[in-house]
Amino acid sequence: MSFAELWDSLLPVGRGPKTGGYRRYSFTEADAACREWFCDHARQRSLRLQTDGNGNLWAHWDVPAAWPSDSMIVTGSHLDSVPDGGAYDGPLGVVSGFAAIDLLRARGFVPARPIAVAAFCEEEGGRFGVACLGSRLLTGVLAPRAALELRDGSGVTLARAMTGAGLDPGRLGEDEDLLNSIGAFVELHIEQGSALDGLGAAVGIAQGIWPHGRWRLDFTGRADHAGTTRLADRRDPMLPYAATVLAARQAAAEHAALATFGKVVAEPGGANAICSAVRAWLDARAPDEAALHRMVEQVEDAARRAAAGHGVEVEVHLESFTPPVEFDPRLRARLAGALAGRGITAPVLPTGAGHDAGILAARLPAAMLFVRNPSGVSHSPAEHADPADCEAGVVALAVVLEELAGR
Ligand code: GLV
Ligand code: MN
Ligand code: MN
């Protein structure tokens, strides 16, 4: 099947008619349709399906011959999205995995090692707040007990959501056998920046991932009447929150880092009332861990000072953290060599975006291929890759799978 056919078959799932953005949150109807799409395409290719205990999907191209038990070559990415996300972040890697298998089979390639396409669960943390939830649970970085306490914005627990989707939350947790069967993981992903465009390259190789994390700041003040409460009498949590947003911007600039408040909830949310609480999420990323921690400390200090100045309480909670990732240099060199051997130039790039490959990299050799994104926009309906570059990504992925799973 051509890449375009495969791509088009997934495109309508979870797309909002107004924004054109995607809402594919874990264990919802849209997620069920994505899972069904994955299973359909695995069946069409006679790939063996597996849903691991953490809700991650696997489509296995088994090999009949005896093979070392730690040599499965896995590709794939995720199918969930941020609110109103783009079509490519995640799905491009999964679709390209199936398309690369089609290409290899059309060429008559016979793998010496098993190959699998994986779709990891809740990579964006769009519903339960913890990014890369499926791969964190799989690798034991997140304990099942901590995961089971997670709730979505409506208070639904992860356990209830999983049960509703026909999955057993009792099976959550580290899967040594599955991890030990993997020889390498290669995630193909749209570039979330425009470096490849500047370099005139359709595909690139990831060097590493900046350390990053999410912190929730709860500012608690006192609800009161907007029309009768004198300014001097207010304990308005919106004011220290606003000061903190500006402080985060300044701290990020000082540390050559990034700090973003992209989600904020004012409670109870009346237009004619001072709110009682503001909950806001800080996404912070930096080239190194020391700079990241200094920046976050600066933001926390600013929040505490501003809160104290307005008679407001503030509490800071770390929701998820990913240390810096340097992808396996030997695997990276092998990918670059195989691609160069086919005349494909793939520049090596760092990224500030998190990925399941970054979580898996702590346990096994992992690598990433990036596909050019001309505008560099991502986590937005404007995210785009040209069809020719998507095809180039599939060709590059097939070269890599052939290199790693061949004789
Ligand atoms: C994932 O896309 C992230 O970096 O937030
Ligand atoms: Mn993303
Ligand atoms: Mn992604």
Image (cartoon, rainbow, N blue to C red):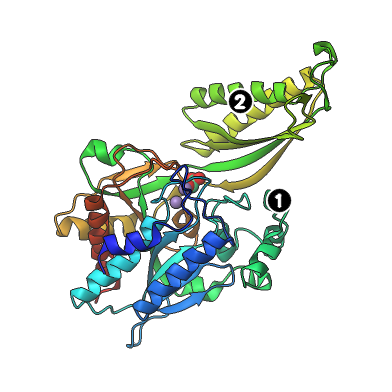
* Rendered image: mark on residue 154: 1
73 in relation to 249, above or below: below
* Residue 64 horizontal/vertical position (percent): 33, 88
Label 1 secondary element: loop
Q: Nearer the viewer, residue 23 or 129?
A: 23
Is the CB–ligand 1 distance for label 2 below 8 Å?
A: no
Q: Which residue is mark 2?
A: 245
> Callout 2, which amino acid?
Val
Task: Determine if residue 328 is in view.
Answer: no
Q: Nearer the viewer, residue 106 or 345?
A: 106
* Residue 262 horizontal/vertical position (percent): 57, 35
Tell me which corner region of the image, top left, top right, bottom left or bottom right, holds residue 66.
bottom left
* Rendered image: mark on residue 2: none
Numbered-mark total: 2
Task: Mark 2 and mark 1 in contact? Answer it, CB < 8 Å.
Answer: no
Q: Is residue 275 left or right of residue 64?
A: right
Q: Quadrant of the N terminus?
A: bottom left
Residue found 22% across the figure and 55% down from its top: 392
Q: Nearer the viewer, residue 341 or 159?
A: 159
